[in-house]
Image (tube, helix red, strand yellow):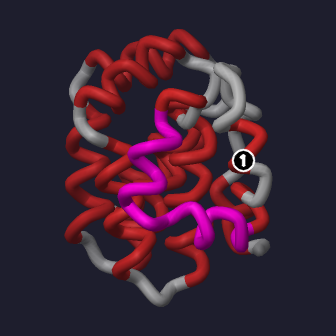
């Protein structure tokens, strides 16, 4: 599972056509499921894959929203003590969030956590306007906080 999640993460960097195929192939709900219940490596790599799949891809953002990705990533973010998993989940939220998500994030009580993680510390700026994703990231980069 970890290898598959890592491959999806790497294959989807800067490749809209591959992102579309992965998204339409049903990977997004499966990756969310892995984030919720996999081992630590699988959780981190699944979140990395989600981050890259939704980055700059409106179709995958819509699919992820329908699957409740913000709520699910917030749940994992709050439940884990792993900084790597927190960083990866925060990156997913950051890549998909816009001003319509502010109330939900406040209700989920994760804004202060997001502000404290390097990849999402500017979440308040994202919540002030509707913007596209900042971008994708290599899986290895999720180790920096």
In the image, which residues are magenta? 101-117
The percent position of residue 84, horizontal first and vertical second, equals: 59, 75
Classify 116 as above or below 47. below
Is 85 displayed left or right of 138 in the figure?
Answer: left
Q: Secondary structure at mark 1?
A: helix
Q: Residue at x 40, y 76 (%)?
A: 78
Q: Is residue 14 visible?
A: no
Residue 51 lies in what quarter of the image? top right
Is 61 displayed left or right of 124 in the figure?
Answer: left
107 drawn magenta: yes
The percent position of residue 115, horizontal first and vertical second, equals: 70, 65
Q: Residue at x 54, y 71 (%)?
A: 86
The percent position of residue 96, horizontal first and vertical second, equals: 54, 34
Q: Residue at x 53, y 47 (%)?
A: 92
The dominant secondary structure in magenta is helix
Along the viewing direction, whichever of 3 and 116 lies nearer the viewer: 116
The percent position of residue 110, horizontal first and vertical second, equals: 49, 65
Q: Quadrant of the C terminus?
A: bottom right
Residue 126 lies in what quarter of the image? top right
Classify 59 as above or below 124. above
Badge count: 1
Classify 97 as above or below 130. below
Residue marked by disc 1: 124
């Amino acid at each position: 599972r970890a290898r598959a999640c890592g491959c999806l993460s790497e294959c989807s960097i800067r490749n809209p056509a591959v992102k579309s195929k992965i998204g339409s192939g049903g990977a997004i709900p499966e990756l969310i499921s892995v984030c919720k219940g996999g081992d630590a490596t699988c959780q981190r790599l699944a979140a990395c894959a989600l981050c890259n799949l939704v980055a700059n891809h409106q179709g995958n953002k819509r699919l992820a929203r329908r699957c409740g990705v913000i709520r699910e990533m917030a749940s994992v973010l709050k439940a884990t003590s792993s900084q790597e998993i927190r960083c990866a989940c925060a990156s997913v939220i950051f890549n998909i969030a816009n001003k319509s998500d502010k109330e939900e994030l406040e209700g989920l009580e994760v804004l202060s956590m997001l502000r404290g993680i390097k990849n999402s510390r500017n979440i308040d700026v994202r919540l002030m306007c509707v913007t596209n994703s900042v971008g994708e990231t290599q899986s290895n980069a999720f180790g920096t906080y």
